[in-house]
Image: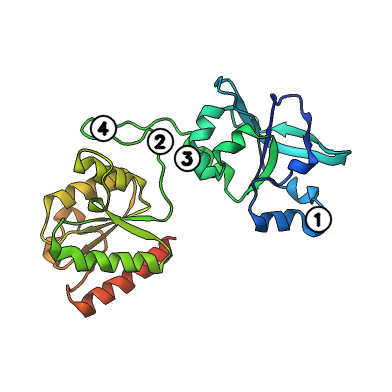
Amino acid sequence: MFNLIVKYDAWGNGRDTIPYVRALEHTEDELVERFRPNGQLDLAALLQLPTLFVQESSGRDTEVAHVGTITHARVVGSNISLEYTYDLAVPAIPNSILETLSGDLAITGFEFHRTHWAVKDVDLYRVLIRGMQAPRQRPTVFQIAEHENIEPTLVSAMMPFHPHFDRTYEALQRAATGARLRCRRADDIWENPAVMQDVVSLIDRSRVVIADCTGRNPNVFYEIGIAHTLGREVILITQNDADIPFDLRHLRYVRYLNNGEGLADLEQQLRRRFEAIA
């Protein structure tokens, strides 16, 4: 959880003010109730949170934000007077980069253009560490994003595009839904001219990848390699033990029967695994 404080001009001297009426704008209702009990702003509690100090974006791409701590706050007339320090271990963050992380930080685009004080139920440092890592080396045969942007609830299914696997895919979808996740397969989407690019993009955004090795499909094996290289959580499933390649035999996998009882058992095993991961 962190404070997001946006103001019109630049931050920098350790003292500033924010209009009292702008406090807890763009904040979820339960957080408003928590930090404004009985209609009174709980400044002592807010001071316990790390703070992201942001200058409003003007379109010039010169604005930067800072991470720091509010050391003192009090109400003075219609304003809140602040004293603060920056975390010197975190360099200034250009708004242009911060805006690419806005989804992970629960910041709407409008907030970059509005002086206000919000509270976000997000781990600020975790998002910044992940989002501001050096760009990863990218392949040439397909495209991946410069920085990871994993969707926390996304599970992807890697299996042949064949009706034989439709009931299996339906079982995976039910397992994901039961764990409050969502499962997608590349043929559910059409975002790129090349099917392989859709597959790779789906893997790259996924928190969990399920790969069905049944039939020893070479495309599935290629996709497993991509998922392992990208560091995704990969769950192997198969209808036949012999279909697990030698190089993957040291990994746990789930064997299932392609009938009603077998798919129900697969669904339950995967749901438990999803819940453990989540």
Residue 147 marker = 2
Residue 71 to residue 215: above or below: above
Q: Amino acid at mark 4?
A: Pro
Instruction: Using the rendered view, name the quadrant where residue 255 is placed.
Output: bottom left
Q: Residues within 10 Å of mark 4 (few under 14, many from 20)?
A: few
Contact, CB < 8 Å: mark 1 with mark 4?
A: no
Q: Amino acid at mark 3?
A: Arg
Inter-mark Cα distance, 1 to 3: 36 Å
Contact, CB < 8 Å: mark 2 with mark 3?
A: yes
Q: Position of residue 180 (x, y in %)?
A: 43, 64
Considering the numbered disc 4 on the image, is that residue within a helix, a strand or a loop?
Answer: loop
Give the residue displayed 27% in from the left and 49% down from the top: 189
Residue 173 to residue 68: above or below: below
First reached walking from the N terminus: tag 4 or tag 2: 4
Give the residue displayed 26% in from the left and 53% down from the top: 188
First reached walking from the N terminus: tag 2 or tag 3: 3
Inter-mark Cα distance, 2 to 1: 41 Å
> In the drawing, does residue 177 fall left or right of residue 17?
left
First reached walking from the N terminus: tag 2 or tag 1: 1
Q: Residues within 10 Å of mark 2 (few under 14, many from 20)?
A: some
Residue 100 to residue 168: above or below: above
Inter-mark Cα distance, 1 to 4: 54 Å
Which of pointers 1 and 3 indicates the residue nearer the eye? 1
Residue 39 marker = 1
Q: Amino acid at mark 2?
A: His
Q: Position of residue 207 (x, y in %)?
A: 38, 52
> In the drawing, does residue 207 fall left or right of residue 60?
left
First reached walking from the N terminus: tag 3 or tag 4: 3
Q: Which residue is mark 4?
A: 139
Considering the numbered disc 3 on the image, is that residue within a helix, a strand or a loop?
Answer: helix
